[in-house]
Image (cartoon, rainbow, N blue to C red):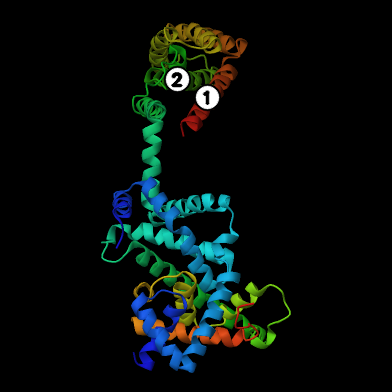
Amino acid sequence: MPSDDERRLIFDAQEGSRGAFRLIVERYMKQAYDIAYGVVGDHDEAEDVAQESFVRVHRSLRSFRGDAGFGTWLYRIVMNVSLNRLRKRKMKEQREVRMQTQYREQPGPDLLNVEQPDLRIHIERALHQLPTLQRAVVILRHINGMSTREVGAILGCSDGTVKTHLHRGLKKMRTRLGFLKVDGS
Amino acid sequence: MRHSRVRSFLYEYARGELSQEKGREIENHLLSCHRCAREVEQIRTIVTATATHLRTASDHRSAEYWHTFIDGVEERIEARGLERVSPLIRILDAIGSLLRFRGPVIAITGGSLGLVIVGFLAIRLLRVEPVQPEEAVRADEEPAQVVAVDDRMGDYFRKSKVLLVGISNLKTADDRPFDLSAERRVSRELVAQARYLKNQPLDMRSARLIGDLEKVLIELANIKEEGGTPNVELIRSGIQRQNLLFKIRMAEALCDSTRFIQARETF
């Protein structure tokens, strides 16, 4: 549930306070950006998704009743916008592939260069190779540190489903990052 | 705690999110279950790896970027607000703002334009024909009086010609007295007609001819019944000397041509 301060901000923003809305954006923009980036995997697109999400929040702010946390409501919007963007991108890629009659293989685990020093790239790549829902759960729960209940509220699924997707997603990542030693080096 | 239940909390245990009591229960289970213990190690590996290497994406952006981010959101909101407004409302809004900020200018311009239009219409509707000079009216008009004078003058010349031709062709060989009563009567009528015509506005040539004819006609009107040939011869010589028949024909021709021109212009 939102704090009193946040509730006040939301109320002012609902009344049309531009400053209050700016404070809300300032408070949540980085997390929204991280979630968007986790799904779309591109900084420019993540910016576009995050800003678009705040535009939608502004449009629907009056309908927010505070039953759930504001963050949960916002991240659900971010996730929906991100998934829509991802869906459109995939459709576009499929059209392009059909037009070019070429099959462009996604970089799989066999393409990972173990000798490459920047491990972050490998981890990000492993993350973005996950199925969409598993990736969303991993991003929200594992990377952004949200609770299972929050993730379930954002994605509209039960706690058990969140746990299952998290378990499967992390298992796939471990498989793809098999070169990692147990001590994390 | 059963194995399946412990497995569902391994992730939370690896991240240290469980309460102490629940954590102890998991630890007790891990001592006896190598499968779960290995699972926990693998989870910790990925948690550590991601915590160490997977920076949050927002850290890639500078502080300046995050300042402009909010502005970008507001710009989008404004742009989206404009998009939702229908073109008609935008036009009305533009007109309203124009009237609001430039009202006096538009009022003055509109008022001036209205006055010009009203003035133009008033001039068109209440247009007064310019007063033409009296002479121009005379020239343009075809007064009935002038037409009547011309007619009477033409009639006068025709009758005079017939009379003078008759006098000129009169046979005087037998020296018998002539019956000139008809010629005298016609002469008197023509003299009266000539006097009338002389009081009318005539051109100089016609007026002179009428004057010459009047003298001859007076002579003819006063000729005696038993005047005999010498008086008639005297009149004939006067007609020939003054070349009156030729002048009458010329005057008639001039009258006819003038009438023709007037008739053509009128037509």
Residue A163 on image: x %, y % = 40, 83
Q: Amino acid at mark 2?
A: Asp
Residue plotted at (50% across, 32% down): B264
Query: How far from the left and from the top, in percent, is residue B263?
Result: 48, 30
Mark 2 falls within which chain? Answer: B
Identify the mark nearer the N-term, 2 or 1: 2
B162 vs B103, nearest the viewer:
B103
**Pointers 2 and 1 in contact (CB under 8 A)?**
yes
Q: Is residue B78 above or below residue B42?
A: above
- The circle drawn on residue B150 is 2
**In the drawing, what numbered circle is on residue B16?**
none
Q: Secondary structure at mark 2?
A: helix
- Position of residue B199 relative to residue A167, above or below, is above
Query: Which element is circle 1 on?
Result: helix
Q: Nearer the viewer, residue B42 or B185?
A: B42
Q: Around disc 2, counting alpha carbons within 10 Å, would you say few (fewer than 14), some (14 to 19), or many (20 or more)? A: some
User: Where is mark 1, residue-wise?
Assistant: B258
Does residue B170 appear anywhere in the picture?
no
Q: Quadrant of the N terminus of chain B?
A: bottom left
